[in-house]
Image (cartoon, rainbow, N blue to C red):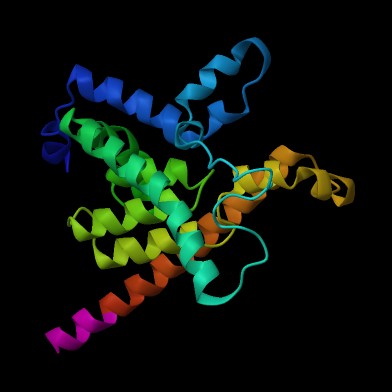
Amino acid sequence: MADKKEKIHVTASGWGALIIMLCLFSGGFAYFSGSLSFLRFLDLNTLIGSFGTIGNATANFQGANGTGARDGFLFALTLVPGAVLAMGLIEVFTRMGVMNAFQKVFTPILRPLLGIPGVCGLPFVNSLNSSDVSAILTRDYYNRGLITDNERSIFVAYQYPGSAPIGNMIATQAALLPISVVAMGPLILMVILCKLIGANIVRLYLFAINRNKKTAKEA
């Protein structure tokens, strides 16, 4: 294990790419206002932007009150710009060596926490504020062989329940805070804790299944 850690070499460009990507995908810069509002350009959703409206209407090309497969198809189209921009940025930063930086920084955190490799650091951080991009990244990592099927299952078990807790909590705080007996911060931490517990239940289940298969094969 020590030899494996020593082989991870991170360049200066890799460290720089890591910092920029954490800023872009964390969602923290989206809520800057006042004199610091110019820093919102460091937020991925700000770079994705929004569709304009048609004429004097208040809705974009998707319209309003749609139903069925047609409305679903138009909704899927709205996800394309964000996914394309995210994957393009990742490809650029990957060539700068950002994956080695993620591996070095996040492996000591994610291995004991969820049993997944450090390369999952980017979707892990992004999943706190968004669900679409982190899901796309997880699928891409699996297709590229960066994570195994079991690691993907554990990671999905973490991402799916309480998806994007920070973004959703902030978006719904006007309705949530009047009925909540605790502040926003503890609520977010509680959701993240439950997500970690659920993912580790899946982790234990997969461990037990794999151990039984190994025992059966040896027998």
In the displayed orientation, state which residue is furthest to the front.
55
First to last magenta residue range: 212-219
Query: x, y (%) of residue 20?
Result: 36, 24
| 51, 28: nearer the viewer | 51
* SS assignment for the magenta stretch, majority: helix
Q: In this view, does 141 lie above or below 106?
A: below
Q: Is residue 70 above or below residue 218?
A: above
Q: Is residue 73 left or right of residue 185?
A: left
Q: Which residue is painted at 25% across and 53% down in the image?
A: 141
Query: x, y (%) of residue 137?
Result: 33, 51
Q: Is residue 159 left or right of residue 36?
A: left
Q: Which residue is painted at 68% across and 14% down in the image?
A: 34
Q: Is residue 35 left or right of residue 1?
A: right
In the displayed orientation, state which residue is furthest to the top.
35
Query: x, y (%) of residue 114?
Result: 40, 54
How many numbered dots are placed on residues in this image?
0
Q: Which residue is painted at 74% across and 48% down in the image?
A: 172
Q: Which residue is painted at 42% across and 62% down in the image?
A: 156
Instruction: Using the rendered image of the protein, determine whether residue 115 is visible from the camera's viewpoint.
Output: no
| 168, 14: nearer the viewer | 168
Instruction: Using the rendered image of the protein, determine whether residue 163 is visible from the camera's viewpoint.
Output: yes
| 27, 6: nearer the viewer | 27
In the displayed orientation, state which residue is furthest to the right.
178
| 5, 218: nearer the viewer | 5
Quarter placement of the N terminus: top left
Quarter placement of the C terminus: bottom left
Q: Quadrant of residue 183?
A: top right
Taking the magenta stretch, the answer to whether it contains residue 33 is: no
Q: In this view, does 122 lie to the left or right of 56?
A: left
